[in-house]
């Protein structure tokens, strides 16, 4: 692996007027007018993230329709040293898909590359283009009698390219793994415009480095993902869902262990929510009845899923919960008796982020710790936030099955406006939350990626050697630092 002396990784290069004109002419030669947005007003919606936290400018927005067009666009940018910010559904929460304020980058949006290229139900493989919306991939798999299990609240908007590039997680990781574990291979346009067809379709391959893995979680800093071959699974033919109450997260952890002992991988989701969050959601969804009254201190949405329909899964879950109650592992529980009731419970879970968004200024976090340390992480973080920010509402939602905890802190708009230095407050809160997780042997970001937001955390929590290796990898793929500069890589 060689390190180029020509440009620091992550450094954007600004072109001259002549370069800009040449680049623009090249772009107009590659893309039809409808696929190249040059008007700044029309480009603006692409340049703001979902939360409205990050906003920037782009010199243009390209919407290519196939891999060859992506390759030509990237080659033109390489020739003219124009940085590129790749974008999928723009639901990322760390500012990775939003250009910087300087406006020198091209925003490369993959949403028009949305074909399902191939489904091989026998091999359990689906090959899709990067701009396919996650829910459409799930539906395509279902239509072929298979399951694509990646599932996030944003599945109606986020795209496969973004899912892979952030190594997305969501609600089914405990059973099926993250986007990385669901990826067999990728097709990528490299920073010089060459196309690498790495669409492996086999589970096994010991022929050297697994290059595809490098692009998963790379946040568009190494190449543009244009397609992916993904793993499929047998569909779930019977499921059972319960809303379970606890006095303490330790009970929830004990119940999870008991259910896993009894049902193995059939425990497909275990989503833990604090009462403070359920209360916020209740205000956001006034038509949704509270699953348990009075609301317990903690609640979990617990789902079992079986590929075999025996007709007895709900009874089995009910029996398991009754046994758990006898052993003091829960305070209360209600089972969904119909599909509509199950949908209503999932609706509550999926409304969490919107509820926080509507409640004021929310700072979200995305840590993970070893499962055994989840309760202490929740307890320590909650105590720290209550002591330092008594007027804020601290909420928790955890994909408990994989140790991922979202600690959220919501300030009323008035309280937030009264902060003497909001930026410093944001950093101080974030540092304190992340520090606890890292001290407990966890990670400062579990499923959202680093983007712009966690660069300072990466500088603090990644070892100098890990930072150096990441820079060397970046240099090997992208020596001129043109792909998503200023994201993910900690500068030297
Ligand atoms: C309400 C809400 C709930 C969420 N819940 C979850 C959750 O449960 N689990 C979870 O993991 N995430 C969650 N997220 C975060 C987000 O939905 C995921 O990170 C998702 O995977 C991003 O996909 P996207 O298509 O929107 O990517 P974008 O936001 O467009 O991009 C994300 C990153 O990937 C890069 N990128 C995008 N496409 C490509 C490509 N084709 N090639 C190279 N790089 C590319 C971008 O440059 C950027 O760095 C949530 C977000 C919101 C707003």
Image (spheres, rainbow, N blue to C red):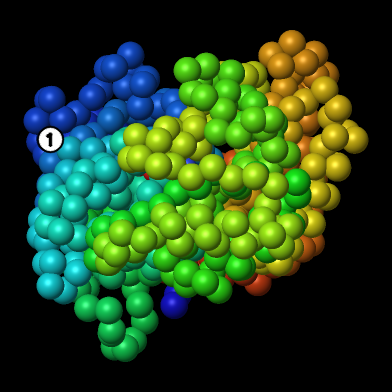
When the figure is inspected, residue 463 is found, relative to residue 220, above or below; the finding is: below
Quarter of the rendered structure image containing ligand 1: top left
The number of callouts visible is 1
Q: Say whether residue 173 is left or right of residue 440.
A: left
Residue 275 figure quarter: top right
Q: Position of residue 122 (x, y in %)?
A: 12, 72
Frontmost residue, 220 versus 261: 261
> Residue 92: percent from the left, percent from the top?
45, 40
Q: Outermost residue toward the right? A: 387
Q: Nearer the viewer, residue 172 or 155?
A: 172
Callout 1 environment at 10 Å: few (<14), some (14 to 19), or many (20+)?
some
Can residue 59 be seen here? The reply is yes
Q: Quadrant of residue 396?
A: top right
Q: Residue at x 33, y 69 (%)?
A: 212
Instruction: Tell me: residue 23, above or below residue 231.
Output: above
In the image, taking residue 126 as reference, residue 203 lies left or right, namely: right
The quarter of the picture where the C terminus appears is: bottom right
Q: Is residue 240 above or below residue 355?
A: below
Q: Is residue 9 in sight in this rendering?
A: no
- Asked if residue 380 is positioned above or below residue 32 in the image, the reply reads below
Q: Relative to the observer, which residue lies in front, 253 or 114?
A: 253
User: Which residue is at 47% across, 18% downward?
Assistant: 287
Say which residue appears at 39% left-offset and 60% top-offset.
313
For image coordinates 28% across by 30% down, the residue present is 61
Residue 105 position within the rendered picture, expressed as x and y whole percent measured from the top left: 38, 36
Q: Which residue is mark 1?
A: 31
Report whether the residue tagged 1 is closer than 8 Å to ligand 1: no
Give the structural element (helix, strand or loop) at label 1: loop
Q: Position of residue 12 (x, y in %)?
A: 46, 44
Image quadrant where residue 192 sits = bottom left
């Amino acid at each position: 692996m060689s390190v180029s002396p020509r440009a620091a990784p992550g450094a954007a290069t600004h072109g001259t007027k002549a370069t800009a004109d040449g680049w623009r002419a090249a772009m107009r030669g590659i893309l039809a007018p409808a696929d190249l947005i040059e008007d700044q007003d029309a480009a603006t919606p692409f340049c703001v993230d979902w939360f409205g936290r990050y906003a920037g400018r782009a010199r243009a927005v390209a919407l290519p329709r196939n891999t060859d067009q992506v390759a030509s666009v990237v080659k033109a940018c390489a020739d003219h040293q124009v940085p590129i910010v790749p974008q999928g559904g723009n639901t990322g929460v760390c500012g990775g898909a939003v250009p910087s304020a300087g406006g020198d980058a091209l925003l490369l949006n993959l949403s028009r590359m949305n074909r399902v290229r191939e489904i091989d139900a026998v091999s359990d493989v689906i090959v899709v283009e990067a701009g396919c919306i996650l829910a459409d991939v799930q539906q395509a798999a279902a239509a072929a009698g298979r399951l694509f299990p990646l599932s996030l609240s944003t599945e109606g908007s986020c795209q496969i390219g973004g899912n892979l590039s952030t190594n997305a997680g969501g609600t089914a990781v405990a059973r099926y793994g993250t986007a990385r574990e669901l990826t067999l291979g990728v097709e990528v346009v490299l920073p010089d415009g060459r196309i690498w067809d790495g669409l492996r379709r086999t589970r096994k391959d010991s022929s050297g480095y697994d290059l595809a893995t490098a692009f998963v979680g790379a946040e568009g800093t190494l190449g543009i993902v244009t397609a992916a071959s993904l793993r499929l699974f047998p569909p779930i033919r019977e499921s059972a869902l319960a809303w379970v109450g606890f006095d303490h997260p330790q009970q929830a952890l004990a119940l999870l262990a008991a259910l896993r002992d009894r049902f193995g991988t059939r425990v497909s989701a275990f989503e833990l929510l604090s009462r403070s969050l359920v209360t916020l959601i209740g205000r956001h969804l006034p038509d949704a009845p509270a699953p348990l009254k009075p609301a317990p201190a903690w609640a979990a949405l617990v789902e079992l899923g079986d590929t075999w329909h025996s007709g007895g899964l709900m009874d089995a879950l009910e029996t398991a919960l009754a046994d758990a109650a006898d052993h003091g592992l829960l305070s209360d529980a209600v089972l969904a008796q119909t599909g509509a009731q199950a949908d209503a419970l999932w609706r509550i879970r999926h409304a969490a982020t919107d509820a926080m968004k509507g409640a004021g200024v929310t700072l979200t976090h995305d840590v993970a710790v070893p499962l055994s340390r989840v309760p202490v992480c929740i307890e320590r973080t909650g105590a720290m936030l209550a002591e330092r920010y008594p007027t804020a509402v601290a909420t928790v939602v955890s994909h408990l099955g994989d140790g991922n905890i979202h600690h959220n802190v919501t300030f009323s708009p008035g309280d937030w406006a009264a902060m003497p230095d909001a930026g410093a407050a944001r950093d101080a809160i974030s540092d304190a939350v992340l520090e606890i997780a890292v001290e407990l042997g966890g990670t400062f970001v579990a499923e959202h990626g680093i983007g712009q937001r966690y660069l300072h955390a990466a500088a603090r929590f990644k070892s100098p050697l890990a930072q150096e290796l990441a820079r060397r990898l970046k240099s090997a793929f992208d020596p001129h630092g043109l792909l998503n500069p200023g994201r993910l890589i900690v500068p030297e």
